[in-house]
Image (tube, coloured by chain):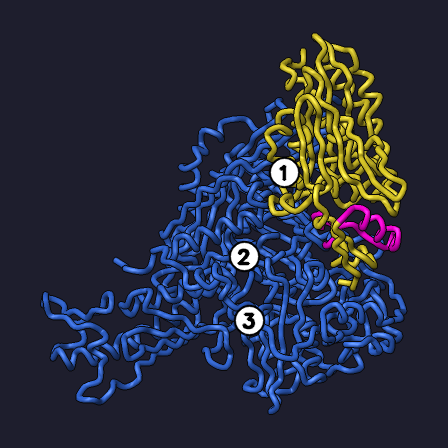
Chain colours: A blue, B yellow
Amino acid sequence: MTSVIGKSVKRTDTLGKVTGGAVYAGDVVLPGMLHGKTKRATVAHARIESIDVGKALALPGVKAILTHADVPRVLHYGSPHPRSASVTQDQYILDTKVRYYGEGVAAVAATSEEIAELACELIEVAYEPLPAVLTVEDALKPGAPSIHDVGPGGNLVLDPFVITRGDPEKGFAEADLIVEGEYGMGRPTPAYMEPNVCVCQWDPLGKLTIWTSTQSPFMVRGTLAEVLGLPLNKVRVLVDHMGGGFGAKQDLFQHEFLCALLAQRTRRPVRMEFTRKETFLGGRTRHPGTVWIRQGFRRDGTITAREARVVFNSGAYGSHGPGVTAVGTAALTSLYRCENVRLEGRCVYTNTPIAGAFRGYGVVQTYYALDILMDEAAETLGMDPAALKLLNAVREGDIAPSNHPITGHGLEDCIRRGIEETGWAARGSRPPAKQTGRLRRGWGMGCEMHGSSAYPGIKEQGNAVVRMNEDGSVTLMTGTTGLGTGAHTALAQITAEELGVKFEDVAVVHGDTDVVPWDIGAFASHTTFMAGRACQMAAAQVKAKVLARAADRLEVSAADLDIRDSVITVKGVPGMSMTVRDAIAAEKGIPAPQLLGEGSYHPTKSYSFAAHFVEVEVDTETGQVSVLQVVPVHEIGKIIHPIAAAGQIEGGIQQGIGHTLSEDFVVDQRDGRPLNASFVDYKMPLAMDMPPIRTIILETAPSDGGPFGAKGVGEDPIIAIGPAIANAIYDAIGVRFRHYPITPEQILAALADKDEAQAA
Amino acid sequence: MHPFAYFEPKTLDETIALLSQHGRAADLMAGGTDLLVEIKEHIRRPAAVINLKTIPGLAELACDAATGLRIGALVTVRTIETSPAVQRLYPALAGAAREIGSIQIRNRATVVGNVCRASPSADTLPPLIAFGAHVEMVGPAGTRSLPLEAFFTGPGKTALGADEVVTAIVLPPPAAQAGSDYIKHGRRRAMELATVGVAVSLRRDGDVCRDLRIVLGAVAPTPIRARAAEALLEGVAPDEATVAAAGRAARDEARPISNVRASADYRRAMVAVLTRRAVAAAWERTGREIQP
């Protein structure tokens, strides 16, 4: 029986956020602070012939301008974990070449943001245009213009990523039915609430302090130190609170380097903040792409073989292309068990906005394809799609994408529970798409699994330092970032539970790389899982020290003691107790030794599972789709904070509905200019568009590695909702869509084609 | 944001004098919900901004069945949306007001501002034209009035002189047995620009439909009347076939463009659907159903 775990305690960040007291990077105001702006390219592919900053420099209030001639020319990684295989080393702070519309070509620091903006307009850049390569098809053509000099060539970000398991030829030969399809994905962007922002300041001894909205402060420290040629203790990164990141803020952006250099040049603090438009132009998107899959089935529905070719559009830089390609492609080894697989993933440079890390990391795309193909196969096999997915669901002992064996029966549990909750069997007896009215309803379901942590792709490590103060209160130091997910609350809960103190007695210190233990960053659904386990380990050490001291005082064995709500009790001796505060109080005037615990956890691999069940209604006159209800069933091992976990799931569903039905950042196919770099024409679902969500969370397959059995939940909910909606649309109108977003216009056109075909 | 001179005139005369001095380089500001965003995003660079909110008497709303509706230049969209009299007498206008932005936006934005901005997709324009609104203006030569239908000359362009101010929009009283409706088509349910907007106003004379006005938004450089569609229904007892025919006629009158929001073909198809639905809804508000 736990006392803090599993309870929706009041979050540690709530009061600060609702009162405005919580400090975000953009809130930092320093004396003498200047404002920086990035001059952005208005061509998609060009060599820079010259940059004339004369007029801009002459503008009163302009303090410094940087072009490629003024910044260190160090080829660096765009993303935070430069020593993993996930990322590419293909960026300069400012280059002599432009690779996408919106790329920074110069930066200005001025006494006001307005003057900096004006100065950017006065900078004159002469371009020698190069042919822009805007599609993967064009980029892969022999003789296509080369976007980068690094990498394997042919505009590939990495060599093709290939996985083979078993004997695919034999598997396909044994199949009674082979189903194949090609699926296409648009370009959603994370659209986090807080635009990228940073403030940089140098002290007189040459130490850089940067307040920045990042998911990975230690990676910012590492990359900045490397590029600027500083030791790590001369770069201090501060991030107290963030307004979201969704993966994209793992990258280091041009402005973070430029802000540091402008502050160095002017010897004054400099602040740089993206406009909303810049979050589109200079941000990171999900990888657009195509996924071709072929699967063999026996008559009974068992999968005999799977083959897939994944091609992702990386945009102008590699960013997380290698990681996304590997994780997305490898995900196709699993979800639905199959011994014979051959998979190939490619990632291709184009002169379009940069694709990067984004919640769901390649798996959104590949499972969208896989789960729609499963529905197509179910129809041909004459089976209920949920039954087909349950039959093939990955389970205990199966080999996961990470090559670790799966623990438990999480996916089967999710599918079964969803079938029960939705009365799926009753709905399944209705022949699909036989409705004739204007409004037609349908049900669909989709499944997913997602690893907690990026291990073994990245050799990760979670760290925590727990200190008990003289009054029995506890200070937890963590390097994890608070994106707004409530992770710090979860870590405090885990610490309190393990140590036996009240949740309110744990204070969390975070957000300062000079103080807190190293952390890889908040991503890969791993903060609660990995840092949480480190907190548990550190708390256990402190608990042992407290009990050893109490054992002396009570003259009993420490093994017979336990702590609950900060009171130490003796097992089997009712009435004999001592408060933690008394136990650690000074004895004969001599204080207790420092009560410090430190945990370092190298994760094992765990997977969380989900099945989403969705009902939609299609207006056959307008093509508009309304999502009427969602029943998401997630298996996450152990719930730490029910409201926060449900919040993750609801937020993921909101983003997933957007991906599937409306969100697409579109580039003009003539010149690479983005067509909807604003919320005027990039539409995410809002509160009024959201259906009722009946979230069910299971704890049937706890992880050996996670704290109290907990696994991740951050990325899972964005994955299964997409194919569930696509499958529900098919159920409603009998038209199969193999791409996202599925727009009203496409639905109308497809319905017209269907009517025409039926009439013929 | 570019620098600009900022004025808070206390009278209309003072405003006209400022306009005469600055000409087209000046922008009038009421709610500022469009103007300030456009200035911040460098879409508009006025040399002067003249705030009308310091002029007394421009925020008056008068609405009753006998005299009609008068919307002063500073009346907010939210006021129109929540006015029980407007909801009762001009339901298509109250409905269109509810479709604009968010509540926060509607608390600032003005109907007259929505009109003067002259966006082809503006939500209040089709119902105002359908209700036969007039624009009242004042300039150096005095006041004048123009049917709203004749006010728009292109996207963002109106018949308003450089030295004139719109003081009010005036709607005639609704007829007996009147019905109206506005339907907006967008990519989501709120915080959206119309892909297509259709307003209908009519009155029922016994069993037949009279004085029909069908106005299409977002499918031409300005809001347009679908006159062929109106003619099909004038003096007719509307049945499903006729209403559908009117929808198709309206579709053929639309002159939409293709952009990232929708293709021209899709917009045309939606004009047919929305016109049919809006005529039916307006007719139902007169107490009758469309005959099968």
Disc 1 chain ID: B
Say above or below: A26 vs B20: below
CA neighbours of label 1 inside 10 A, class few (<14), some (14 to 19), many (20+): many
Same chain letter for marks 3 and 1: no
Give the distance between the C-alpha atoms of the residues marked 3 and 2, in whole angstroms. Answer: 38 Å
Q: Position of residue A743 (x, y in %)?
A: 68, 40
Q: Position of residue A540 (x, y in %)?
A: 30, 73
Q: Position of residue A749 (x, y in %)?
A: 73, 33
How many dots with numbers? 3
Closer to the camera, B10 or A378?
Answer: B10
| Region rendered in magenta | B11-37
In the picture of the structure, the residue carrying the numbered disc 1 is B79
**Where, by quadrant of the figure, is residue A119 drawn?**
bottom right
Residue flagged by tag 1: what amino acid is it? Thr
- Residue at 16% in and 73% down: A578
Q: Secondary structure at mark 3?
A: loop
In the picture of the structure, the residue carrying the numbered disc 3 is A216
Closer to the camera, A80 or A479?
Answer: A479
Marks 3/1 in contact by CB < 8 Å: the verdict is no
A266 on left or right of A432:
right
Residue flagged by tag 3: what amino acid is it? Ser
Say above or below: A98 vs A9: below
Say which mark, if any, is on residue A166: 2
Say which mark, if any, is on residue A73: none
Give the distance between the C-alpha atoms of the residues marked 2 and 1, in whole angstroms. Answer: 69 Å
Disc 2 versus disc 1: nearer the observer: 1
Residue flagged by tag 2: what amino acid is it? Gly
